Amino acid sequence: MNARRLQARWREGWWTGARPCASPHCGPRPPGELPSLVIVHSISLPPGVLRGDAVEHLFLGTLDAGRHASFADLRGLRVSAHFFVRRSGEVLQFVSTHERAWHAGVSSWRGREGCNDWSIGIELEGLEGRSFVAAQYRALQRLLRALARHHPIREVVGHEHVAPGRKHDPGARFEWSRLQRALGGCGLSIWPRLDPSP
């Protein structure tokens, strides 16, 4: 394990375990609002194409819509996530966790709408319906532990849970049980729950 991983810390909402790529697509959280929810997403651009730089350009607002036919609908789109976990396990950070990233869209959780206000968005490089790799699970687990130590995070859910019917990521091949086992004792409630308790 390299020195950077051993010494990962937080600086004004930026995690030193990630490569910083500041996105202009963000804004302030409501006054006094602290993030208590993590939303896991998946993304690949073009769809199904992995290990390119298109996702990074999308979140930075520099995606050339002419590069691929599937990018036409993304022209002028202003979206971001706090973190992006690549297939290699590399983590990129686009927005300070103190700020509101634009990742969940129309969403609600436990009867409250507008999840961006109190959530942190993590995008996994991949396509819903396909498997993710071990390096991504390791990186995600490490990131979630760091978030839980730094913020009052209580729950981890998928985009599909906060926008049912509209979104389906990270999808059926994402191993929630693997995440639950790895983060046991961390104080986080991982959905979907394996037990029937409320």
Image (spheres, grey):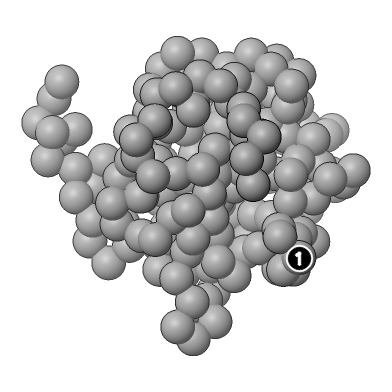
Q: Position of residue 185 (x, y in %)?
A: 34, 35
Image x and y of residue 87, in percent: 49, 20
Residue found at x 53% / y 49%? 155
Q: Nearer the viewer, residue 18 or 107?
A: 107
Q: Amino acid at mark 1?
A: Gly
Give the position of the N terminus as an image quadrant: top left
Instruction: Residue at 23% x, 56% y: name it.
Output: 10
- The x, y position of residue 121, in whole percent, is 55, 50
Q: Is residue 51 found left or right of 34 in the rendered image?
A: right
Q: Secondary structure at mark 1?
A: loop
Residue drawn where x is 13% and y is 25% of the image: 2
Label 1 packing within 10 angstroms: few (<14), some (14-19), many (20+): few
- Image location (x, y in percent) of residue 70: 83, 34
Instruction: Residue at 62% x, 64% y: name it.
Output: 116
* Mark 1, residue position: 111
Name the one closer to the observer, 101 or 70. Answer: 101
Q: In the displayed structure, would residue 74 be above or below residue 177? A: below
Residue 174 appears left or right of 160: left
Foreground of the two, 84 or 72:
84
User: Where 67 falls versus 60 (above or below)?
Assistant: above
